[in-house]
Amino acid sequence: MSLFRKVLVANRGEIAVRVMRTLRAMEIASVAICHRVEREAVHARFADEAYEIKGETPVAAHLDAEAIIAVARDCGADAIHPGYGFLSENAAFARKVAAAGLTFIGPDADTIALMGDKISARDFAGKHEVPVAPSVQAEGDIAAFVKSASAIGFPLLIKAAAGGGGKGMSIVREPSELAERARIAASEAQRYFGDGRIYAETYVERPRHIEVQVLGDGQGKAIHLFERECSIQRRFQKIIEEAPAAPLPEATRAAICDAAVRLAASARYKNAGTVEFILGADGRFFFLEMNTRLQVEHPVTEMICGIDLVRAQVEIAAGRGLPLAQSEARVRGHAIECRICAEDPDAGFLPATGPIRLLRAPEAEHVRFESALEQGQRVTADFDPMLAKLVAWGKDRAEATDRMIVALKQLTILGLRTNIDYLTRVLETAAFRDGALHTGFIAEHADILAPAAVDERLRDRILIAAALGQRAFRDAITGVSEPHASMGGWRN
Amino acid sequence: MSLHLTLDGEKHSIEIIRRKPHLVLKVDGRIHEIPEWSAEPVDEMAIRGDAVTIARAMVDDGGRETCFVRLDGRTHEVVLIDPREESAGHDSLRNEIHAPMPGAIVSVHKQPGEQVVRGETVITIESMKLQTALAAPRDGRLLDVLKQAGESFDKDELLARLEPADEA
């Protein structure tokens, strides 16, 4: 079976550009879709062809399955790569793509549906001897749920059945809070996912987030490309990921990777997927969910395995089978990824908007900067606050960390608030160096993660640099007159 | 007259002392000789004999200029104060709830006339798919809420006001 001639990438931003880069290397033409407001966006210009999708909002355009499939057919694409987010885990979309005679670069619609519902996914995992945490599903009224959930014991974690990304999620430590928190979670779940079903499960204290990259051929054969650790999170969302995991006993690592392969093989999983686990301090691990798509953090796996995961996805979708055998998969060194977000870490990680007035990406060996940013663009509330990803590889974890710190310090994005300096501070902590990671890391180390005070010498330099950045002040120095010197008074 | 700036909430001032043969500035009373500088966004300045590489970008947000300065791998925000703004009071902030970011109202928890205590949630907003509770800035009675559930707003837009506090 031959590879595709033309592939539509149903996404935007850094991931669309990243997928197209591989398509180009494979000599496959790429097609971008964009909303009216992003006609000039990097992904639209990077593609060989770009088509506009109408939509009330930009997000609505990227979720318009029918319109996207129509573009793919009209332009003669053979396949659609969904990236992550948007329609990537939408079973109905995958089904429609197939019905239109196109190839969906991802798993079958039925697999997406199975894994997309957290409850059916848990049941499936449990049936195939993948450990799942004790849990209770809300059926009917809240009072009955409170009673059965309390029986599991506190603390509890409440989640949305159709959820993801921390929406509708809540840790409950006090029995008295359960009813109210369940009600809020159900309402959030209804709002975000159109499905108000929730469930409660044992909350693991000081949990680590460990996930396994898998590839399946759709015939029951599956391999893993080792694990990633994504324990550094804020608002239940990952900000720093690495591969392999920070220190992990070899037996635990093997057990987790085996469980992931068992799940993928049992599901006759096709294409790339990620099986997520929560690992307790006691070494027990539980299945969290399976993401039936390429992950944001896939580059760390690529760097330690020397594999292009998008290429693997395309080849599997084209029927060429798995690109390597389990025995051929090897780990080389260590890789770390930081998610660069438009947000204010010193004010509860609230999303920030604003212009990108100055952009300087680090350029160094073993450093990847994945973005679709341009100097001069404006970051709006239209899309996700993730601006870019910075990935660094080293021969071991310490070298990868050092290299990442240097790269973060070189990375310059000015004009709006970002988490760049915050990420640097996280990497500079002794706890991160030691690999003492857990998903509460950010809260636990909040004190030392606050920015250091600015001393007098540094302060004067900053103030001088700022003053000389102002036109009126410079004009007062160089003696240029009206209109810019109208604020006058500088020439004593 | 000197240029007033704020950094991390503290006010500072810069004065031009000499322009020739090289620039001399007074920062909060301290004299700095600056033989080399430029207007470039990435600039290598010489301050008191030290070479200092900075990157900077100026953002004009509705008349309020903020300079983002990156130095030694760390970004700082400096607000350059317009003398006109300086004379205006900021007391209003204690009576008002403004949008911290653009978004939409999810729900309004308190109605005009209701008593609220400091920290109590008045409005829940949603921005970039994240819900955020906006709390009363102080104890008092709610004067009005200017937006209803479902309505959207821009950053810094006034969303609710408290009745002016009694002068005690």
Image (cartoon, coloured by chain):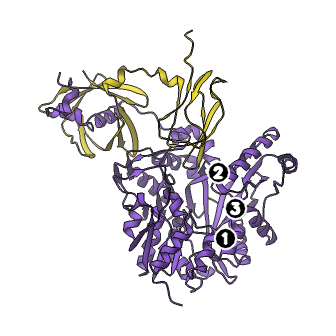
Chain colours: A purple, B yellow
Residue occupying image coordinates x 72% and y 72%: A263
Gap between marks 1 and 3 measured at Cα: 18 Å
Element under disc 2:
loop
| Residue A375, quarter of the rendered image | bottom left
Q: Residue A247, image x and y in percent?
A: 63, 59
List the residue tagged with mark 3: A277
Is A204 on the left-hand or right-hand side of B145?
Answer: right
Pair 2/1: label in front = 1
Residue A146: in sight, yes or no? yes
Element under disc 3:
strand
Residue occupying image coordinates x 66% and y 34%: B109
List the residue tagged with mark 1: A112
Is A487 on the left-hand or right-hand side of B55?
Answer: left
Are the residues under marks 1 and 3 on the same chain?
Answer: yes
The answer to whether the residue labelled 2 contacts the one labelled 3, judged by CB atoms less than 8 Å apart, is no
Dot 3 alpha-carbon crowd within 10 angstroms: few under 14, some 14 to 19, many 20 or more? many
Q: Tag 1 or tag 2, which sits nearer the N-term?
A: 1
Q: Chain of mark 3?
A: A
Quadrant in which the C terminus of chain A is drawn: top left
Gap between marks 2 and 3 measured at Cα: 12 Å
Q: Tag 3 or tag 1, which sits nearer the N-term?
A: 1
List the residue tagged with mark 2: A439
Residue ranking furthest to the bottom:
A1
